[in-house]
Image (tube, rainbow, N blue to C red):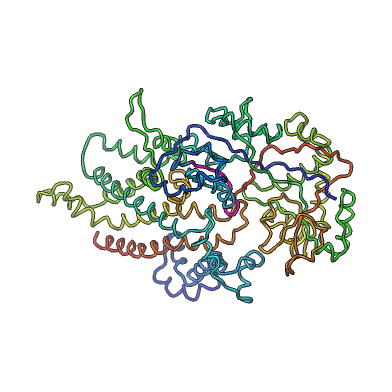
Amino acid sequence: MTTATPTVAVGTQETNVPRTTAGRVRKRLNSRTATLVSIVIAMVWTIPTFGLLVSSFRPEDEIKTTGWWTAFTNPQFTLENYQQVLFGRSSSSGQLAGSFINSLAITIPSVLFPMAFACLAAYALAWINFRGRDWLYIAIFALQIVPLQMALVPLLKFFSTGVTLGGVTLMPAWDLVDEQKFAQVWFAHTCFALPFAVFLLHNFISQLPGDLMEAARVDGATHPKIFRTIVLPLITPALAAFGIFQFLWVWNDLLVALIFAGGGDETAPLTVKLAEMAGTRGNEWQRLTAGAFVSIVVPLVVFLSLQRFFVRGLLAGSVKG
Amino acid sequence: MAVSTRPRQAFVIAGVLGLALSATACGTGDDKKSDKAGSAECAAYEKYQGHDGKKVSIYASIRDAEADLLERSWSQFTDCTGIEIAYEGSGEFEAQLPVRVDGGNAPDIAFVPQPGLVKRFADAGKLKSLNADTKALAEQNMPADWLKYGTVNGTLYGVPLGANVKSFVWYSPKTFKEKGWEVPTTWDQLIALSDKIAASGMKPWCAGVESGDATGWPATDWIEDVILRTQGPEVYDQWTTHAIPFNDPKIVDAVDRAGSILKNEKYVNGGFGGVKSITTTSFQEAGVPVTNGKCAMHRQASFYANQFPEGTKVAETATRSRSTSPPSTRPRASRSWALASSSSPTPTVPRFRRCRPTSPRPST
């Protein structure tokens, strides 16, 4: 690398030599070599996924006996794997088509609920003065370090037996069956997401210029009005960022869904089905290739489409701010 | 020709978990119950009539093809009684069951592959004991030794549901016939055959112990197998109950004996490479080279029949004439004899190994 850079770098550096080490590192990272290296790294990084994609179209015998790269010298392709995982008859494998819908039914509300609650809470914590506000914020902030695994059993008890305090029933058991169990999953995901969501959005909202709020106040705007017409449009990038995080987290979540939704056909999301797909002793693992691709389609679309929005929003904010 | 193949381990206890009974009546169950309720084939389920539309949940670690068979086996019960059975199989069963039970969300019935887990729930008062009828039926049909696995402190909570025979050596009769190898019946013959195969340039054994979180268990099967064969079940029991030290000379001898095959560079690892490849080969794939002639023998439990590639015919015995079977491009793998030592006593009572994950999760 050192032998390749000098000729290019000398000319530019003569007039504009970075003074600090960090500056020099930064300069180097912008060089053509660095770009090339990062492209190579990105390609190496993508190869396993690419291999998985190729594998998903290969027949079972081929997958199990030879590497995916042999597909280029000895091309044999089939849609059998996709057929099996999407419409397979076996009750505990396949039928991903149904659980795909379940995944959506779990994920979309589990993103929207915390987003809605968190931006209201974040606004209140940032711009409404009330006693104990800072303590409340610190408490919410601290909640982030509670691992969700700790809450699984208590929360499950909360749903299945309700809350009783000193013999007085404060909340009866939910007694949910089948599809109703989605509500438990939404509840759980919303709980687990809120501390981080409030923290993230609070930081963003509190950075908004106070002059805007004051001007709105002078014009007679109430808190709901300020929130709706000033804050919400300005924090869309942050909402998008949180949306991506939460969406990917919920979509990929196995643990919470497994415990609160169960593995029944009515509620099991893709991740649960994927985990059971390979069979009791994992002998049908060729299905995982196709299953994995079915499950990453939606996150990929969401990420790519929202990311653009996300970046544009950030840039717009920076120029105006 | 076969020395007794002892069914061990991998049995499943169907226990009725208390706290559950969240059987909720749902109104739409009516059409499920057919008119068969009064017919002859439904006579066996007469006692269960009158619960039309109720739902019973079953939770287990059995998935895919085996789960389909299970569901088919109780479909008649559902047809006759109208009781719906909601089955759920999960690879995280052993970890999830305690969470569900502690969370007050226990299934009505669970198939538990670990007697230790049954004891834990029983001690915590989470289990319901079997009713008198079921208990009588179980005692009538099961040897007392088997019922021990579902018994905690004298109370019977569950009945063994299935078992795997762990002492099979899988081989391809076609390869054996082509090469003129004889199926051995003693340990010495087995070693002699291994040497003969090794001398012909082929690795006689293939093995693989990779199994995600549970890596290594196929090797423990080897050792336990040898202990049972050479030392007998009494020593085995003493060993598992810590009556003799873990490194008792008898045990060390058995480990060395297993190692004389597994660690022999001439013997392993057919189809995969050297001895070291045992640890990186998954147990699911370890026996596959038997079907393509790259490996002569593979020691694994009866469930391995499912692991062979599709189209492999698995047969009861190997010496039977093959003239009736359709011609196949694939060689057949079949079990017929068990790893045996001529000097070992042959107990008549089946011995089970205690507990170990029987459905290891695929590595993530």
Give the residue drawn at x 34%, y 63%: A311
Give the residue drawn at x 70%, y 62%: B312
Provide the residue span drawn in magenta: B56-66
Relative placement, left or right, of A153 versus B327 is left
Relative placement, left or right, of B119 versus B257 is left
Q: Quadrant of the N terminus of chain A?
A: bottom right
Front residue of B80/B67: it is B80
Quarter-of-image position of residue A57 = bottom right
x and y percent of residue B301 in the render?
72, 49
Q: How many dots with numbers?
A: 0
Front residue of B130/B83: it is B83
Q: Quadrant of the C terminus of chain A?
A: bottom left
Give the residue drawn at x 44%, y 57%: A98
x and y percent of residue B62 in the render?
58, 48
Give the residue drawn at x 25%, y 45%: A126
Q: Residue at the top extreme?
A: A166
x and y percent of residue A93 in the render?
53, 56
x and y percent of residue A170 in the render?
32, 30
Q: Is residue B61 magenta?
A: yes
Q: Is residue B354 magenta?
A: no
